[in-house]
Amino acid sequence: MSEAQSAVLALEDPPTDASLDAIDHGLRGYNRRFFDRGTTVTLCMTVRDGEGAIVGGCIFHLRWHWLEVEDLWLDDGWRGRGLGRTLLAAVEAEAMRRGCTKARLDTASFQARPFYEKCGYRTWGTIDDYPPGHAVHYMAKDLTPAQ
């Protein structure tokens, strides 16, 4: 009997932390054979109103000389003032200060694709009907200064 024939598949709903950790550890170990995982730094830049309440911000990661924008949000009342551009530029500046040369993000069709295009991002891939009735756009930007 082969190992595949003796393997047992088991759905965990919900999955245990031990199972999630084992799979994550296994994949990361495999990946290290091909590249240095490096260090991932997770940062957050907030936008606060005069009373100190958070009205926007950005959660982002720095890894392999890339800026990865996870979430960028501004409260509706603070949009349309150029603050989003200022926030993204500050995030990019911090990423470049820490050695990043490229940036990537994804945005849904009902979110901010035109905003990111105005900020210099280009779409390199799109998945239609994800979420249903919409699309997700994968975008990137070169952060190195033009020569």
Image (cartoon, rainbow, N blue to C red):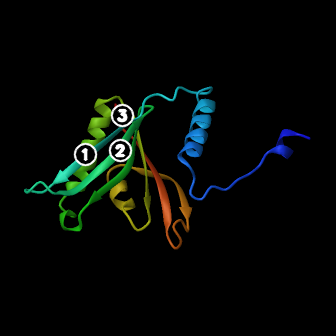
Extreme residue toward the left, this view: 50
Find the distance from the CA under tag 1 to the CA under tag 3.
21 Å
| 40 and 129: which is toward the camera | 40
Quadrant, the C terminus? top left
> Which residue type carries mark 3?
Thr
Find the distance from the CA under tag 2 to the CA under tag 1.
8 Å
User: How many marks do you count on the picture?
Assistant: 3
> Which residue type carries mark 2?
Phe
Q: Earlier in the sequence, mark 3 or mark 2?
A: 2
Q: Residue at x 31, y 33 (%)?
A: 96
- Tell me the element at label 2: strand
Pointer 2 with pointer 1, Cβ within 8 A: yes
Q: Nearer the viewer, mark 3 or mark 2?
A: 2
Q: Earlier in the sequence, mark 1 or mark 3?
A: 1
Q: Residue at x 70, y 53 (%)?
A: 10
Tell me if mark 1 has few (under 14), some (14-19) or many (20+) residues whose alpha carbon lies within 10 angstroms of its own: some
| Disc ID at residue 138 | none
Q: Nearer the viewer, mark 1 or mark 3?
A: 1
Does residue 134 sit above or below 25 in this rendering? Answer: below
Q: Which residue is mark 3?
A: 144
- Tell me the element at label 3: loop
Q: Residue at x 56, y 45 (%)?
A: 20
> Which residue type carries mark 1?
Met
Q: Which residue is mark 1?
A: 45
| Image location of residue 44, percent across then percent down | 28, 44
Q: Residue at x 57, y 35 (%)?
A: 25
| Image location of residue 130, percent across then percent down | 53, 65
| Image location of residue 63, percent across then percent down | 43, 34
Q: Which residue is mark 2?
A: 60
* 31 sits left or right of 76 in the view: right
| 60 and 100: which is toward the camera | 60
Does residue 27 sit above or below 51 in this rendering? Answer: above
